[in-house]
Amino acid sequence: MSIKIYNTLTQSKTPLKTLKKNKVGMYVCGPTVYDDCHIGHLMGPVIFDSIARWLKASKYEVIFVNNITDIDDKIINKSISTGQNWLDITKIYTQQYWDFLKELNVISITDFPKCTDYIPQMVAYIEKLISSGRAYEIDNGVYYEVEKQNNYGKLTKRNLEDLVSGSRVESSSQLNHPADFCLWKKAKPNEPFWPSPWGDGRPGWHLECSVMSNEILGETFDIHGGGDDLKFPHHENEIAQGEAHGGEYATYWMHNGLIQYEGIKIGKSDPRMQDKAFANQFKARNLLDTYGADTIRFFLLQGHYRRPNDFAPKNLENAKISLHKLYNLLGKFLDNDKNETLDQLLNRNNNDDINQSLKSFIDAMNDDFNTGLAIGHIFTMVRIVKKLGGIEKENGLKTILYAGRILGLFPQEAFLKIIDRSTITDDQAITISNLIQSFNQEYKLNKESVMDDLLNIRQELRSQKNYDASDKIRDTMKELNITIKDSPTGPTWQTK
């Protein structure tokens, strides 16, 4: 079955036909690096990482570009308000963003272009737009003339007047049309700037993405992705520039859903975001520390990418519980770093029911990258595996593991984080035996720390009067020739 993609531009689902055989060029809008990342900055990279992984599993070579906007009004304003150099600000928050991507197991991005590295190309791009009559200069910069763009608004299926009404647009009496957007901003005093034929200044936000995609992927490329909130004006303006500069821009436009909280959309202007405690719930660091990066990734892939994600705590807790059930089942295999291709998975000597569920998993991913439905088929495999034994069970478990790993789930690093003091259950305590027996070398070298953690978990269970679970830990250790002794000063352990 060929891969089908829902194209926002055509509002239809069509088979993927790439410009170059077995090669995909994909551009996904990245963050403006001026403040701490919130989860909205990371949703797109996680979702499109799973898409890139699937394309690679389907034997495509993928160039995945995710830009860094490192010059913008927000960055300049942050520099003014804090007294920090704007370059230091962008360096700090770019590294923070990269660190979060690493935690979330986002590994498929091939290029992270920074806007400030492409200023000469941006100047040349603007010059071409001016020479073709599509852009003009006024006192404060250079602007693109939208009325000269045929079908402006075709992405959002609205006419120009409808798009401008109620939207934030440029304000200047010199503009030919209120929707004309800035390509080059002339610098104000004490602002960072670069030289240009129109005076010292800096590029406009919309222009930056068009130029960087053009430089890395070419005038026309396969997939452009981003959040649903970027359709207008950002993506409409990218299309206008791109088509004026070199013809067709991106073939497929893909947009991921946005953040909700208890069924209500969350946006920057939401009055609830003025409450610091409420807003902090969506800070990336808080979410990763509270639920774990593996849970956040799993949560983001549990639905369809085009639908919103509801970050109500109960939903995140449910995702964590579901993921830990999978970890419990896969326990003894989690410490290996092996991956399998789709061909290897399909050729695995599996039970017929497992094979059927695997094929349904593949069909779900081929149908507009439906990770939520694909994960549902993983849980179907779980129900089947529980009824199997011997080699059939082992093959089924490995199929679940490697199918999940194609989506970036079940990374080896998660193995060391499975023992969770705050959520341990009887079933989790039982699996500690499997975990210890399958320690990787790093874990073996850190046995003292491991045992301290286990003893602390056991003490917490005893303080909660959960003696069944605490005794299971003691008995499991005994099977491994490790004796735990309780005393008034606390538990101790020794090997036989």
Image (spheres, rainbow, N blue to C red):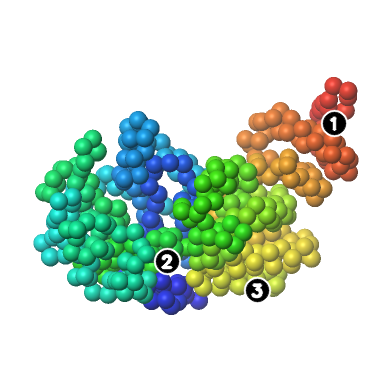
Q: Nearer the viewer, residue 406 or 49?
A: 49
**Between discs 2 and 1, the one toward the N terminus:** 2
Q: Amino acid at mark 2?
A: Met
Residue pointed to by mark 1 = 483
Q: Quadrant of residue 441?
A: top right
Residue 387 screen position, x and y as percent:
79, 65
Q: Residues within 10 Å of mark 1 (few under 14, many from 20)?
A: some
- Point out the image quarter for the C terminus: top right
Residue sitting at 60 percent across and 68 percent down? 373
Q: SS at mark 3?
A: helix
Indicate which label's residue lies in the foreground, 2 or 3: 2
Q: Amino acid at mark 3?
A: Gln
Instruction: Tell me which residue sits at (84%, 39%) in the image.
Output: 464
- The answer to which of marks 1 and 3 sits earlier in the sequence is 3
Residue shown at 18%/51% (left/top)?
Answer: 141
Q: Are marks 1 and 3 in contact (CB under 8 Å)?
A: no
The residue where tag 3 is placed is 356
Left or right of 149, for residue 349: right
Disc 2 secondary structure class = strand
Mark 2 highlights which residue? 254
Residue 201 to residue 376: above or below: above
Which of the two labelled residues, at mark 2 and mark 3, occupies the earlier sequence position?
2
Q: Position of residue 325 (x, y in %)?
A: 72, 55
Report, in whole angstroms, how far the alpha carbon at label 2 lies from the one at label 1: 56 Å
